Amino acid sequence: MKRLYGLIIVLSFGLLSSCYTLKNQAIPVDVKTINIQFFENNAPLVVNNLSQTFTEALKDRIRTQSRLSIVRNEGDVVMSGAIVGYQIAPVSIEATNNNTAPIADANKLSITVRVKCVYDKDKKDKNLNFEESMTRFANYRGDINSQEQNLIQEITKQLTEDIFNRAFSNW
């Protein structure tokens, strides 16, 4: 009876593992290296460390979630781009007394990144190349100064996930 239960467990694991696919399954076998260029901050509203934070987060995402090696020279894939938007806008307005203007009860921080991903020009499949803008945001209440770096980290995580999925999972 114990053998039967053991066999059922082993078969269950086998079935479950066959249903799971890795995120980086779409990376061609002959692609081994990637050059991630510095994402310059060209947004009208500039935060000093945003370029460095974003570029390093993207490198870290690719380093930990794929088999690709990051190189400084020519890679099988070249990823470049810029931060083109950094905006703070009200999400909801709070009413005040008659003599004062309404104030924002909650705000939204949005970051937009323009990304270009080019696979080696000698490769046959050019369908993997792309160039597009991606935007993510986070809502917050209160003063931006005390929350800005945490919001940037949260939005950067979302953006790097979007870029990774677009580049390597054909999403």
Image (cartoon, rainbow, N blue to C red):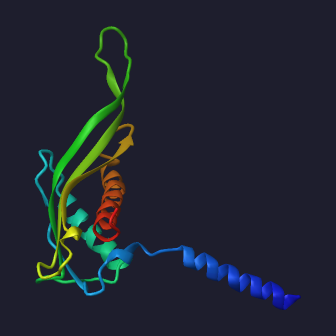
Farthest residue, direction front = 124
The residue depicted at 11 percent of the width and 45 percent of the height is 44
Closer-to-camera residue (151/34): 34
Q: Give the residue furthest to the top.
A: 98
Compared to residue 75, the image places residue 104 above or below, namely above
What quarter of the picture does the C terminus occupy? bottom left
Q: Position of residue 78 (x, y in %)?
A: 16, 74
Residue at position x 32%, y 39% from top? 108
The x and y percentages for residue 155 are 33, 54
Quadrant in the picture for the N terminus: bottom right
Residue sitting at 81 percent across and 84 percent down? 5
| In this view, 94 is above or below 90 | above
Residue 50 x, y percent position in the rendering: 21, 58
In this view, the residue farthest toward the right is 1
Compared across the picture, whether 2 is left or right of 80 comes to right
The front one of 135 and 24 is 24
- State whether residue 144 appears in this view: no
Residue sitting at 55 percent across and 73 percent down?
19
| Image quarter of residue 116 | bottom left
- Count of number-bearing discs: 0
Residue 131 lies, in percent from the top left, at 17, 60
Of the pair 41 and 165, the residue shown nearer to us = 165
Q: Seen in the image, is 169 located left or right of residue 78?
A: right
Foreground residue, 20 or 87? 20
Does the rendering let one see residue 31?
yes
Q: In which quarter of the image is residue 10?
A: bottom right
Q: Residue 123 appears in which quarter of the rendering?
A: bottom left
| 21, above or below 90, in the image | below
